[in-house]
Amino acid sequence: MTPGARLQAAIEVLDRVQAGAAPEVALTNWARASRFAGSKDRAAVRDHVYDVLRRWRSCAALGGGDSGRALVLGLLRGRGGDLSLFDGARHAPAPLTAAENAHLAADPDLSEAEALDCPDWLMPDLRAALGADFAPVMAALRHRAPVFLRANLARTDRDGALAALAAEDIGARPHPLAATAIEVTRNARRVRQSRAFGAGLVELQDAASQAVVEALPPLDGLTALDFCAGGGGKALAMAALGAQVHAHDIAPARMQDIPARAQRAGVRVERVAHPAGAFDLVLVDAPCSGSGSWRRDPWGKWTLTRAGLDRLTQTQAEVLAQAAPLVAPGGWLAYATCSLLDAENESSIRQFLDRSPDFTVQSTLRLTPLDGGDGFSLATCRRKT
Ligand SMILES: C[S@@+](CC[C@H](N)C(=O)[O-])C[C@H]1O[C@@H](n2cnc3c(N)ncnc32)[C@H](O)[C@@H]1O
């Protein structure tokens, strides 16, 4: 595909998103219908689509509307990209109309919310939570996230993992957020097919997620329950640090890959449908707005609503209430979200503590994309003996 044809494909995918399709569904349907597209074409179209999703508001303002065509025009304009690709040649977008040329010639004059790609209704909450970091964090969320790996200490150390990646020409370097964190700098798309990945030397995991696990009480020998385990990213990381990990999720199908991942990683993680008893540590990696990971899942930024946020905080309260009785006397309850919002972090944990006098906060950790990884918040509470 030519560069122009890739832009036209992105336009068509974005039109489907605009009509209500989820981005991943729209991309998959486009790829199925476009057998001529090679892997590099698919990656380029996906990158265009995700670049627009991160910057939907500014693209719409710069491009003069929120059709796929206007959004892609806005993306190119914002980047100082090559508008002459709109030339109608070989499946490229049609040439610019007079109205489009007039819009592009006018001063863009973006509002702060448009320039930062922030939903209006969320600005006060984000500003309150982030203070002086509000604008830099919102600006960071307009960019692609780095690709991070976790060196799997059950199989190797970070230097060993880096050497194995280098042997397969995957550029990587240590990242300061966690002792296990590796940032991929070159050939990231090769990781999943690499021998290093297949042999369980590395796992794909955001650096902030790794930092959260590293900030838990020393895990070696502890019994741990990952109460919201999902695909098991943190469960596997806890097991690699020596915990006896049990994984639970309200949607057990989300945990279906855990056995294969654990086998590759050389660790044990036991899935439990109905957790009972008392664990040294219960991790609640709660369902949340995902606002700290909007670089990876940017559509969440535009689909979150006040009612949806209220439902999430309600769920967070319920999950904490279900998980707390499973903490042994003297044990820990760790509450984490990948949200930047106080309503899901400080406020959720404060309300839990008000209802649970036998718990006290021992430590907290707050990370934003300015630290390199996703935004994350962790509060580790201890139960009285
Ligand atoms: C943030 S994700 C977990 C990510 C996972 N810990 C990881 O590191 O890969 C939140 C998970 O909580 C689960 N969940 C939602 N409500 C729950 C509940 N009431 N009890 C247990 N799990 C719940 C969701 O199904 C989802 O998989």
Image: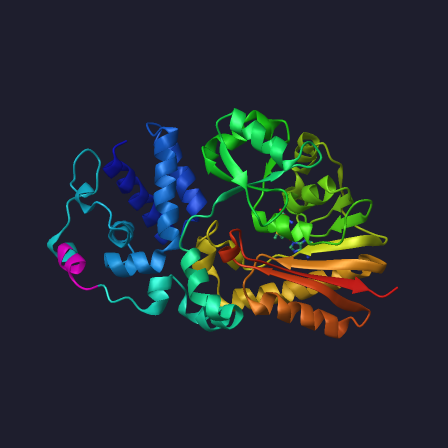
Q: Nearer the viewer, residue 354 or 318?
A: 354
Up-down relation of residue 73 to residue 153 (above or below)? below
Residue at 61% across, 50% down = 209
Q: Nearer the viewer, residue 61 or 17?
A: 61
Residue 175's quadrant in the figure?
A: top right
Give above or below for 72 relative to 268: below
Quarter of the image for the C terminus: give it: bottom right
Quadrant in the picture for the N terminus: top left
Q: Is residue 19 visible?
A: no
Locate residue 178, reporting x and y percent. Answer: 62, 48
Q: Is-magenta flag for residue 382?
A: no
Q: Residue at x 46, y 67 (%)?
A: 134
Drawn side of residue 216 relative to residue 45, left or right: right
Relative image position of residue 109 (x, y in whole percent): 24, 67
Seen from the viewer's position, the closer of residues 267 and 161 is 161
Q: Residue at x 14, y 55 (%)?
A: 101
Residue plotted at (52% across, 32% down): 191
Residue 103 is one of the magenta-drawn residues: yes
Vertical placement of residue 231 versus 194, above or below: below
- Furthest residue toward right: 385
Where residue 241 appears, as percent x and y from the top left, is: 73, 42
- Residue 176 is situated, as x and y percent measured from the top left of the image, at 57, 48
The residue positioned farthest toward the left in the image shown: 98
**What secondary structure predominates along the stretch shown in magenta?**
helix
Stretch in magenta: 101-107
> Is residue 219 something one can see in this rendering?
yes
Asked where in the image residue 186 lies, by quadrant, the reply is top left
